[in-house]
Image (cartoon, rainbow, N blue to C red):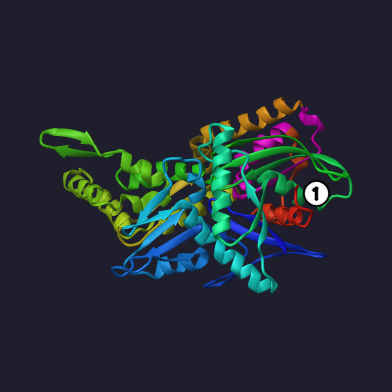
Amino acid sequence: MRVGLDFGTTNSSLACWQSPELTLTRFETATGTTESFRSLLYFEKPPAGARLRAWAGPEAIERYLEAENKGRLIQSLKSFLTSRNLRSTEVFGQQAQIEDLIARIVRPMREEAERQLGQSIKSVVAGRPVHFVGADTEADNDYATERLRVAFTKAGFEEIEFELEPVAAAYHYEGTLDHEELILVGDFGGGTSDFSLLRVGGVTTQLLGNEGVGLAGDALDAKIVRHVVSPALGAGTSLRSFDKILPVPSWVYAKLERWHHLSMLRSRETMQMLETTRKQALEGERIEALLHLINEDLGYRLHQSVQRAKVDLSQAEETVFRYADGIADIETRITRREFEGWIAEELAAISGCVDRLLARSGVDPKLVDAVFLTGGTSFVPAVQRIFASRFGRERIRSGNEFTSVARGLALRASRPAAG
């Protein structure tokens, strides 16, 4: 049996086509089941001499939230695949290869799918972005893809085929058609935004061109952190050192923007520096709140508030950002106009990517029959306007925004393997 695997920066999903229906693997959570498996690991500190133990996906989140003494939360591993310098990371004094960490996430997904389907799964069609985060050349993309291949092999797959994620989304959309169309697919993940022009619905699916950019949902979240969260935690404030007034060190807040790096600030040197900063700060209570967030490793809870605000701003003209734990309490009103100003650079990058795709493919926007958008960022009104201005709002389509890539990969997996 071949399945489709969408291993994402933030969420992953796995699907299987068994005629006449497509099945998505569902995963247990504390409140029910979900089709999205969070792409993260949680490690608890092991006893001396013991092997590292990790939990993945929803179970990892639950263990992390329940723990009084926080362990190590690791996520967004897909974003590091192009780095030739980052081959491993230290977890409680033990080195862990990036490929092994990814395998720890994917293996329980495969095993749960086997349990639900009642069959062994050794073959997979896996998605990959057009351009991985940090990729400057096609060699970088190839390097990242090969690392994924190694990771998926370690997770128990024996036959692995890759398909571009926006092409997979096109397979999903094509299943809704009874005629031929020229479509543009926009696939927005956590770390990458990919776009493809395809002719679908005919005898074969024809790829006319693709482009990608290494930013998406995480980059938009970072702007809310920069403009709302970081100032509440001391960014832009001052400290008194002897007779001088100096700015609070800014590099800590750059780390905070990539919220999954929060635990990396828990080194002895950084904590000592922040404790000294707290004593010298003119607004020491803000640095105290930052220290609390780092000490308690509350990045996940903070990120939930960030995502809620982003979702709210996709549905309303303004919202109130709220985060509270008794020490780090933040409440700030945000308007959609403010948010769109913060993400102007990202919107310009997405717009430029779409325009390059059209120019390099030689396709007139008027000839595009439909635009299929998938992924959480596709809900952001300013992102939708990019496509509405070029193709008309009436041509924009969506559906199964968080699982359409996995669905398309499953349909691709149901066809004979490329040979």
User: Can residue 313 be seen in the rendering of this structure?
Assistant: no
| Residue nearer the viewer, 90 or 202 | 90
Dot 1: few (<14), some (14–19), or many (≥20) neighbours within 10 Å? many
Q: Residue shown at 53%/50% (left/top)? A: 9
**Image quarter of residue 18:** bottom right
Question: What residue type is disc 1 on?
Answer: Glu
Magenta-colored stretch includes residue 185: no
SS category of the residue bearing label 1: helix
| Residue nearer the viewer, 142 or 230 | 142
Position of residue 15 measured from the top left corner of the image (x, y, whole percent):
69, 61
Q: Residue shown at 21%/46% (left/top)? A: 273
| Image position of 408 (left or right of 222) | right
Q: Residue shown at 50%/37% (left/top)? A: 134
Position of residue 195 measured from the top left corner of the image (x, y, whole percent):
67, 38
* Boundaries of the magenta span: 363-390
| Image position of 264 (left or right of 214) | left
The overriding secondary structure of the stretch rendered in magenta is helix
| Residue nearer the viewer, 94 or 401 | 94
